[in-house]
């Protein structure tokens, strides 16, 4: 049978929505069954019945129209979507549901249909009876008669408003996410730049603070070497020494906390004994403890305990805790350092009889720049970063630190927990410093554009028995070395005319067979500064103001290597 269901479906008479299914079935029976249906006709009838049921129950709008755009069928799905009943829609132009500004679309669609072309998944907007605009996806197919001529069109319309809204929302979310990502990248870039500028500022600050400290410390050391008998002068010298060391510690703490915060600090771990760490810390803190007339008690495990640790950094941790206890305990107080080992973990307790910590401040004492008592802080000095530095260094060693106190005037206790062991599998450091060789007269050239720093350092070295010459710029230093050989050159980096790096390279080229020992003496102490000085040919890198003991060890190494 050559008749298509679709072409006959187009010729159906109008029927109401209430009678749509009954009307479709009745019509299809007339078309396909007749009075005495054959088996083929009964099969066709069955298929047509299924088709009619599908059309009637479909959630999609299924509509047919003539080539002139007149609606000829309108299912229940169309009623639900557009709000018009079948009686209201059938016989009306399809523009009934097309916005005025989109009428041209209908002409284009009918042009494709007349050519026998199918239009698939065409997304557009249609208008409901109540004026709502609906996003729809249309599939439009030509309907042909028995001779194959196109006589109309059938369309399936699906409401895609929800998916469109979801897509638009997704697009907006993506745009917001992209905008947020761009903003985050911008903020991160600004924070990175601010962090870089902060590190730069701290490095410059440290350099500028160290420069005036250098001649002060040199002059103080010169006076110490002269050993005046006057007790008042001795006391004044000790005061200068303590305050210079305090300033140096503040500068070093600033730089350390900056390095740790930016992840630029690295630990130089070795197997080291707890006793050596404690000895070095007490040695550094003893002047402050004694100046306040405190009583210090130290209790260590009977069996030697070892740690895989950076000796200098852990000694710094205990030194900061001891200094903290000394500063915040009234004169004549008691400080105790007690260490216990449970077989796996080392617990170090530093307790004092000082001003204590309010309970509401216990969780904040390790925050940067936190000051428990500002009036006390102003009188004792400090930047509020010592405990922050303690916490960061302990955590870098795989441990933790805790603060305890019963409140104001009840003293404080700081508990450090660290991984440790009792049996050293390799030799550990036995002493805190290199052995200083016997004094030997060295020929030393001091080069610094800070005249006070150069002259006071020269006087200090002469007082130690060395032959010292001074210059104040790089080119003058090179001329001096061409005329008179030196054993050691103490060379500043920030020099006029020729900077210290270039001066060092020129000096290395003077006599490669008999190289002089080059020591960078500078206010720049960052890791990058040390790397640059090594690349320029320096043997040592000392940071201003010079630690006399450290300088003595460098000079002693020159003597030993020359022997």
Image: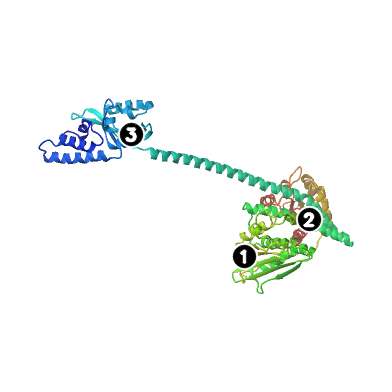
Q: CA distance from mark 3 to mark 1?
A: 75 Å
Q: Mark 2: which secondary structure?
A: helix
| Residue on which disc 1 sits | 418
Secondary structure beneath dot 1 equals strand
In the image, residue 195 sits, relative to residue 557, either above or below, namely above
Q: Residue furthest right?
A: 230
Q: Where on the picture, by quarter, is residue 191?
A: top right
Whichever of callouts 2 and 3 sits on the residue coming sooner in the sequence is 3
Is residue 393 placed above or below 67 in the rendered structure? below
**Quadrant where the image shows the C terminus:** bottom right
Front in this rendered view, residue 97 or 275: 97
Indicate the position of residue 367 as horizontal and vertical percent values.
Answer: 65, 55
Disc 2 and disc 3: Cα gap in Å?
88 Å
Q: Which residue is mark 3?
A: 82
Marks 1 and 2, the one that precedes in the sequence? 2
Q: CA distance from mark 1 to mark 2?
A: 32 Å
The mark closer to the camera, 3 or 1, is 3
Give the number of callouts. 3
Q: Residue at x 72, y 60 (%)?
A: 324
Report x, y in % for residue 302. 67, 74
Query: Do tag 3 and tag 1 residues touch (Cβ < 8 Å)?
Result: no
Residue lying at the far front of the rendered structure: 18
Q: Callout 3: few (<14), some (14-19), or many (20+) C-alpha neighbours within 10 Å?
A: many
- The residue to which callout 2 is attached is 244
From the top left corner, tell me how far across and down residue 478 is, in percent. Answer: 77, 47
Tag 3, which secondary structure?
Answer: helix
Nearer the viewer's eye, disc 2 or disc 3? 3
Q: Quadrant of residue 94?
A: top left
- The answer to whether any part of residue 513 appears in the image is no
Q: Above or below — where is 469 with respect to 401?
A: above
């Amino acid at each position: 049978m050559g008749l298509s269901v679709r072409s006959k479906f187009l010729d159906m008479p109008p029927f109401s929505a209430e009678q749509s299914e009954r009307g479709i079935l009745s019509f299809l029976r007339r078309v396909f069954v007749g009075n005495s249906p054959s088996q083929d006709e009964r099969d066709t009838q069955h298929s047509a019945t299924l088709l009619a049921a599908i059309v009637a129950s479909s959630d999609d709008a299924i509509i047919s129209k003539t080539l002139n755009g007149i609606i000829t069928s309108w299912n229940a799905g169309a009623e639900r979507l557009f709000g018009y009943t079948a009686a209201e829609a059938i016989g009306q132009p399809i523009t009934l549901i097309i916005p005025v500004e989109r009428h041209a679309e209908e002409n284009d669609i009918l042009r494709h249909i007349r050519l026998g072309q199918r239009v698939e998944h065409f997304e557009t907007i249609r208008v409901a009876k109540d004026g709502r605009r609906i996003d729809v996806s249309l599939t439009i197919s030509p309907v042909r008669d028995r001779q194959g001529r196109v006589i109309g069109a059938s369309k399936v319309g699906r409401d895609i408003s929800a998916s469109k809204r979801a897509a638009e929302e997704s697009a907006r979310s993506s745009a917001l996410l992209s905008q947020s990502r761009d903003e985050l990248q911008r903020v991160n870039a600004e924070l990175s730049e601010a962090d870089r500028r902060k590190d730069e500022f701290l490095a410059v600050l440290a350099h500028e603070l160290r420069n005036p400290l250098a001649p002060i410390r040199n002059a103080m050391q010169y006076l110490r070497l002269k050993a005046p008998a006057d007790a008042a002068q001795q006391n004044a010298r000790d005061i200068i020494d303590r305050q210079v060391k305090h300033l140096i510690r503040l500068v070093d703490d600033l730089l350390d906390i900056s390095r740790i915060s930016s992840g630029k600090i690295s630990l130089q771990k070795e197997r080291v004994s707890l006793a050596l760490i404690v000895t070095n810390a007490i040695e550094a803190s003893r002047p402050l403890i004694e100046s306040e007339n405190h009583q210090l008690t130290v209790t260590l495990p009977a069996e030697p305990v070892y740690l895989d640790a950076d000796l200098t950094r852990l000694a710094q941790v205990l030194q900061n805790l001891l200094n903290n206890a000394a500063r915040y305990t009234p004169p004549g107080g008691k400080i105790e350092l007690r260490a216990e080992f449970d077989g796996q973990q080392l617990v170090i307790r530093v307790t004092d009889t000082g001003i204590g910590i309010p309970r509401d401040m216990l969780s904040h004492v390790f925050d940067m720049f936190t000051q428990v008592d500002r009036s006390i802080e102003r009188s004792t000095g400090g930047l509020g970063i010592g405990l922050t530095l303690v916490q960061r260094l302990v955590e870098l060693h795989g441990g933790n630190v805790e603060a305890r106190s019963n409140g104001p005037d009840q003293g404080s206790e700081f508990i450090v927990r660290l991984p440790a062991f009792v049996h050293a599998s390799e030799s550990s450091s036995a002493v805190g410093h290199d052995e200083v060789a016997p004094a030997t007269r060295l020929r030393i050239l001091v080069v610094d554009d800070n005249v006070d720093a150069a002259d006071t350092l020269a006087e200090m070295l002469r007082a130690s028995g060395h032959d010292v010459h001074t210059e104040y710029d790089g080119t003058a230093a090179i001329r001096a070395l061409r005329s008179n050989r030196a054993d050691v050159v103490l060379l500043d980096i920030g020099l006029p005319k020729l900077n210290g790096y270039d001066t060092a390279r020129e000096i290395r080229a003077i006599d490669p067979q008999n190289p002089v020992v080059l020591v960078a003496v500078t206010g720049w102490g960052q890791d990058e500064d040390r790397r640059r000085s090594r690349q320029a040919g320096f043997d040592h890198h000392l940071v201003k103001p010079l630690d006399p003991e450290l300088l003595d060890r460098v000079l002693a190494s020159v003597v030993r290597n020359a022997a």
